[in-house]
Structures are given as C-alpha cells and as structure tokens.
Amino acid sequence: MAITLRSQREIGIMRRAGAVVADVLSKLQEVAEPGISTAQLNSVALQVTAESGAEVLFKGVRNPSADFAFPGAVCASINEQVVHGIPSEKVKLKDGDILSIDFGARLDGYCGDAAVTFGIGQISDEKQRLIEVTKKALDIAITNAAPDVKWSQIAKKMQDFAESSGFSVVKDFVGHGIGRKMHEEPKVPNFVSDELLTNDIILAEGMVIAVEPMINAGNSAVRTLNDHWTVVTKDGKCSAHFEHTIAITNRGREVLTAK
C-alpha cells in the first residue's frame, strides 16, 4: 500500500481546493428548500465551481457495474439514500426530508472532497439526532487524528459512538486518501475489521485523507438501485453522511474543507 505524503506546498493547494468545496456546500445549504429539485442544486454547484476556476470531480466518473458515467457534479441523496444519489429535475425536496450532499472539486491539479447532511424545513427529532450523531462521529475522527496514531483506534471510537447511540455504521463504503486523484491509498474505514487490524494505518505528517462516516438509523445493510449508482438502506430507514478532507500535520491535523 503506497501512501503519498504531501508537501506543505501541495497541502496549500489542497487547502484552496477545499475552500471551493466548502463554498459550494455552504451555498447549497442556503438555497435548498421544499420544492427545489436536486438538478437545480447541481446547477448551483456547477456555477459556483466555475466561478472559482475549479472543476468538479464527480461528473463523468465511471462505475464498472454501470453502463453510463455519473452525470452529476454532486451526489444528492435523500432520506434512505445513503450515497451516490443522481441529481434530477424529477426529484424535488419536501418538508421533513434530510438531504446528504457529497461534492468534490479539483483546483490546480489537486482535489478536495466533503459531504454534509441537513434537514429540509421541519424534520423529526429522530432524523435530527441521526444527523448530529453522524457529524459527531466525524468530529471524533478529526479530534483524534495526529501523527503516529493508529487509524484502528480512531475507527473504533467512531464505531462505538455510533452504535452506542443506537445507530449502525455502513461497512460497504469507506473513506480514502486524496491528492491529485479523488481516490488514493489508503482506504479509511469508519469501523474496525480484521482487515484493518492486520494492515493498520499509522497516521503520518503529510498524509491527506477524506474521512466520511455514513450512519444508518436502522441496520448497516445497503443495496444499489437499478440506476447502478444510488445506494439505499435495505430496511428503508434514513441514513446520514458527513465528510471532510483532513491533512495530518506536525501540530495534529488540519481540516482542508472547513468553511
């Protein structure tokens, strides 16, 4: 497993890419409201990205099991949709929905990637708690990330917190290294497995990782819809998703996609 350590210069460029990602996600949270379509949100993301001089990451990504590339700049996943929801004019937000937006951008050859889940209008207490627990799981990772720390120790804290809160951690999708490409080594799980314990990740200065817990209100099982992209919970219960691009520094960590 070849993990690329980034220089301060490279991290500086990724910080600017991360700022674009943060601006896009902030703008989408401002405009998202009942009645707006996920295609409209996609258009806003394209406009803000173009104005920044960056390019979107997700549009055109190939999936080996799909017969077409991902068509959107954003992944827009509603309620029981976990990730990879395809933007559409037919899909309009409703009061009480929760929406997960995943977005990535490339600037001057380097990438940033982040995700956020938020409510549309008035949402239930259960949905709000799911959002808060998922965000807290990411916060746990950020707080504990530092050079020489084993990732399994952090993943265990994330998993223990989510499960002790009555939720489950999606195990089919994990975080990843990020740099010149959106997906680089290492794979960064939000849970502990035999594979992780056997091949643990020791965080080191210069590593840049995208940490993205996906937490389900019910059990952890997921399935992919017939569009070959949209992933949903098998039990139909809601899911939430948060992500940040994080650089490991000599002071601990820096969140490159923070607003």
Image (tube, grey):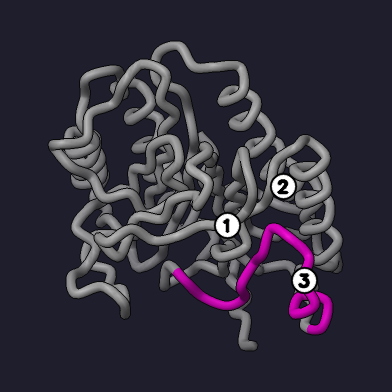
Asked if 238 appears above or below 97 in the picture, the reply is below
Q: Position of residue 53 (x, y in %)?
A: 23, 50
Instruction: Write the residue at 56% across / 25% down.
Output: 127
Asked if 190 appears above or below 42 in the picture, the reply is below
Q: Mark 1 points at which residue?
A: 221
Q: How far apart are marks 1 and 3 (CA)?
A: 16 Å
Nearer to us: label 1 or label 3: 1
Q: Distance between the residues labelled 1 and 2?
A: 26 Å
Asked if residue 238 can be seen in this view, the reply is yes
| Label 3 neighbour load within 10 Å: few <14, some 14-19, many 20+ | some
Viewport quadrant of the N terminus: bottom right
Q: Which amino acid does label 3 sit on?
A: Ser
Instruction: Write the residue at 45% across / 54% down.
Output: 113
The tag on residue 142 is 2
Asked if residue 47 can be seen in this view, the reply is no
Q: Where is residue 164 in the image (x, y as percent from the top left)?
A: 83, 40
The tag on residue 193 is 3
Left-right relation of 176 to 140? left
Circle 2 sits in a helix, a strand or a loop, which is it?
A: helix
Q: What residue type is labelled 1?
A: Ala
Circle 3 sits in a helix, a strand or a loop, which is it?
A: loop
Q: Where is residue 173 in the image (x, y as percent from the top left)?
A: 55, 63
Nearer to us: label 2 or label 3: 3
Q: Does the magenta stretch include residue 136?
A: no
Q: What stretch is highlighted in magenta?
A: 183-198
Residue furthest to the top: 122
To which quarter of the image does residue 137 belong? top right
